[in-house]
Amino acid sequence: MALVGCNHPASEGSTANTPSASPPKPAAKADESTWGNYLSEQGRLHGKDVSVRPYIYVIPGGDNVAANDRRQNETDSIVHGIGPILKPGGMLILGGADSKQTTLFVTNLGKQLKADAMKGIVVMVVNDISEQTVDATALKPSGAALRFVAM
C-alpha cells in the first residue's frame, strides 16, 4: 500500500534558535508540506523528551472520496504498520487544517487500536482546544501518553 505524503518523519536534531512560542498556525488552505512542517515544529517544541524520530500524519480535511480513503489508509498505516514498530518512548504526531476531521480521525483510530497497543508511546494531537476532551477520551484505551497541543 502506498501512502503519499502522510508519513513525514520529523527532522532529527534541533537548532540553538528553537522558538519558545508555538509556530503560527498555517492557513487552512496551505499545502500538505506546510502543514507537515508546522506539525514537525510542534514536535520539536513539545517533544524534546522523546528520544526517537516521531512519525507525523497530516490529516486531510474534506468529505470527498479521496480524503476519506486517505484517512482510512493513514489509520491502517498506524494500526497495522507504524503502531506495532513504535517502541515506548516513541512519538506519533497527528494534526491537520480541519479540527473536526482530525478529531474524527483520532476517534476512529482509537476504536481500531487494541487496548494498551500504544502504551508508553507519546501521541501528540495538534488540534483546536475545543477538541481536547474528545481526543483524550478516544485514545485513553490505547494506553498512549496523550500530549495535546492547541493550535
Image (spheres, helix red, strand yellow):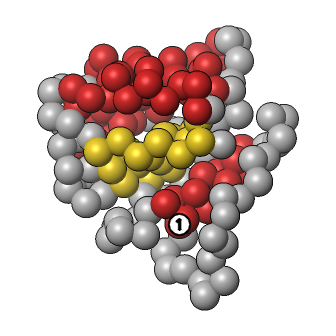
Residue occupied by mark 1: 44
Residue sitting at x 44%, y 62% = 47
On the question of residue 37 being in view, the answer is: no
On the question of residue 129 being in view, the answer is: yes
Residue sitting at x 44%, y 20% = 134
Q: Specify the quadrant that holds the N terminus.
A: top left
Residue type at mark 1: give it: Arg
- Please, what secondary structure does the residue beneath circle 1 have? helix
Compared to 44, does 29 lie above or below? Answer: above
Q: Is residue 57 left or right of residue 114?
A: right
Residue sitting at x 54%, y 25% = 131
How far from the left and from the top, in percent, is residue 39? 60, 52
How far from the left and from the top, in percent, is residue 117? 18, 36
Q: Residue furthest left?
A: 116
Q: Specify the quadrant that holds the C terminus.
A: top right
Count of labels shown?
A: 1
Compared to 104, does 51 lie above or below? Answer: below
- Of 24 and 64, the residue lying toward us: 24
- Of 100 and 148, the residue lying toward us: 148
